[in-house]
Structure formats: C-alpha cells, structure tokens
Image: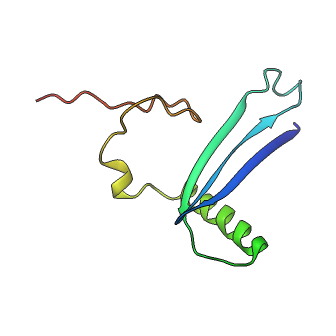
C-alpha cells in the first residue's frame, strides 16, 4: 500500500472547510486507484498562528468525523443534486401525506 493524499483547508467567513482525497496508488493492493474523498466543515476560531490554525482545523475535522451528527444535521433531508464528493445520492426523500 502506498497512499497519496491532497487536502484543502480554507477559512471562509466564520467556517473552515476541509476537503480532499486519499488514493492507494499501489497497483497490487488497489489496481483501480479508487479515491476516498472527504469534506468537513468546522467553526472558525480566529487563530492567528498558521501552524496552530491548520493543526486545530484538521484535529477538529477528525473529531467531528468520529462523533455522531448533531440533531440539526439529522432532521431535514438535503435537496438538490447528488453530493459530489461522497456520491451518496444526497437528494430529498418523498414525503407521504
């Protein structure tokens, strides 16, 4: 196994967006080189030191990935086009009623 990753961390207004992908570039363990793509969003804290800002954002993205979703994230289904990073088919569900 030989992993290659690209990570983007952007501070946008009051949120930090962390996205990227990881690929197993070893032709023996993964001949198709399928990418694992991810995207996380965490609140910005206004940290001035670049290294501390980066490490803090990456750590908080890891923690948010390991914890269950908040109630606000579970309630209403998303509308519109499929989620392009995870290809989860993120569409609104029909409501009976």
Residue drawn at x 51%, y 34% is 83
Q: Quadrant of residue 46?
A: bottom right
Q: Residue at x 74, y 49 (%)?
A: 7
Left or right: 28 as drawn, with respect to 52? right
Residue 24 coordinates in the image, percent (x, y): 81, 34
Vertical comparison of 29 with 18: above or below? above
Which of the colour schemes (rainbow, by chain, secondary structure, one colour) is used? Answer: rainbow
Q: Nearer the viewer, residue 3 or 81?
A: 81
Residue 4 placed where, x, y %?
84, 41
Residue at 69% x, 56% y is 9
How many marks on residues? 0
In x, y percent, where is residue 63?
59, 62
Residue 79 falls left or right of residue 10: left
> What residue occupies the far top of the structure in this picture?
32
**Figure quadrant of the N terminus:** top right
* Residue 43 on image: x %, y %: 52, 66
Is 44 located above or below residue 64 in the figure? Answer: below
């Amino acid at each position: 196994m030989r992993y290659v990753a690209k990570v983007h961390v952007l501070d946008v207004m009051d949120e930090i967006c962390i996205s990227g992908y990881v690929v197993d570039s070893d032709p023996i363990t993964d001949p198709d080189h399928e990418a694992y793509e991810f995207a996380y969003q965490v609140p910005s804290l206004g940290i001035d030191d670049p290294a501390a800002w980066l490490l803090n954002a990456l750590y908080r993205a890891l923690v948010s990935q390991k914890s269950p979703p908040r109630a606000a994230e579970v309630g209403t289904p998303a509308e519109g086009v499929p989620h392009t990073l995870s290809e989860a088919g993120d569409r609104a569900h029909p409501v009976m009623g």
